[in-house]
Amino acid sequence: MLWTASVISAWVWALAPLLAFGFAGDRITRTCERLPIAVRLILPALFGVPYALAGSGWGRGNWLVIYFVLPVVIAVILWHARQSDPEQRGSWRDFVILLILGLAVDLRWFEPAWPAHLGPLSKLILLDSAIYGFLVVRQLTDVGFDLRLRGADIRTGLRELLFYAPIAVPLGLALGFLEWRGHLPKPGSAALAFVFTFFFIAIPEEIYFRGWLQNLLERRIGRGVSLWLTAAIFGLSHFNKRSAHFNWQYVLLATIAGLFYGRAWRRQRRVAASAITHTCVDAVWSLWL
């Protein structure tokens, strides 16, 4: 990766909202609530700045417009969801936003806009836009996005890992999906893998699937059914991972994993707890299996 000043600036600009909301989300929401609604709805256009920075040499005008306009569209739709559904039972508008975001990431709609090594920036921009939309504009409750880890988060996350591992490891080995690598990674590599997985895979996916999707579905169909349905959707989102064809083994194992991630999240409505389980599963698979 070529770390030019513009690329570094783009990463900083894209990561800053995620970290700001993770450590001071309530304060940001209260501050934004004092702004006129028109300003609140236009403000997320700033999330398109990373594309303008990183794409200065290769960015195309149409994509630039999309990255500046889409965050505003998300905010406007979620503002209408807030107005039409003040009890937060879950509006069809909420699910439309989640569907669009899910398909955009899963079907890689935005990949043509970026060089391969900068693809994660696209996901960060979408994540920032959705976090702002759901937390500041929609003000959806019980999301549980907080990067200030608690002891209970760690205990819950590791507990669900211990429940999941005896099921997943034998099943994965039996299906030929997992294979023991027979060597231990270097401590530095292992630590880097855990940190990268936590921030760039587990946190985004857990906000989406547990903090938003399972959270909203619970209000409609109850705890039990929402847990299973979210896990199934989570599993299906992996259909094209690690394979050019429908990867049913990955879908099966991810669906089972989703049950335990969902249990971890709903214990205290904490994304950090399910992200710890998710991080451990993914990091262990990538390092040892």
Image (spheres, grey):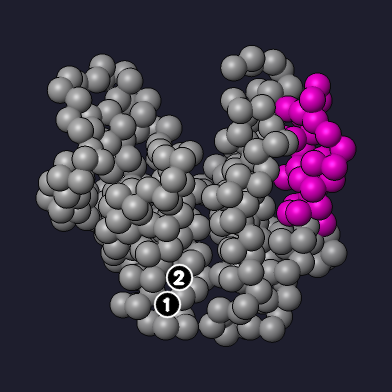
Dot 2, how many residues are within 10 Å of its Cα: few (below 14), some (14-19), or many (20+)?
many
Q: CA distance from mark 1 to mark 2?
A: 5 Å
The residue where tag 2 is placed is 215
Q: Residue at x 33, y 70 (%)?
A: 228
- Is 67 a magenta residue? yes
Q: Compared with residue 96, is residue 64 higher up or lower down, i.e. above or below?
A: above
Q: Residue at x 79, y 48 (%)?
A: 66
Q: Residue at x 62, y 52 (%)?
A: 104
Give yes or no for contact between labels 1 and 2 (Cβ–Cβ under 8 Å). Answer: yes
Q: Do we see residue 32 in this rendering?
A: yes
Name the residue at the front extreme: 245
Between 237 and 261, the residue placed more toward the observer is: 237
Measuring from the top left, give residue 22's x and y in whole percent: 51, 48
> Which image quarter is the N terminus in?
top right
In the rendered structure, which amino acid carries the disc numbered 2? Asn
Between 39 and 208, the residue placed more toward the observer is: 208
Element marked by disc 2: helix
Dot 1, how many residues are within 10 Å of its Cα: few (below 14), some (14-19), or many (20+)?
some
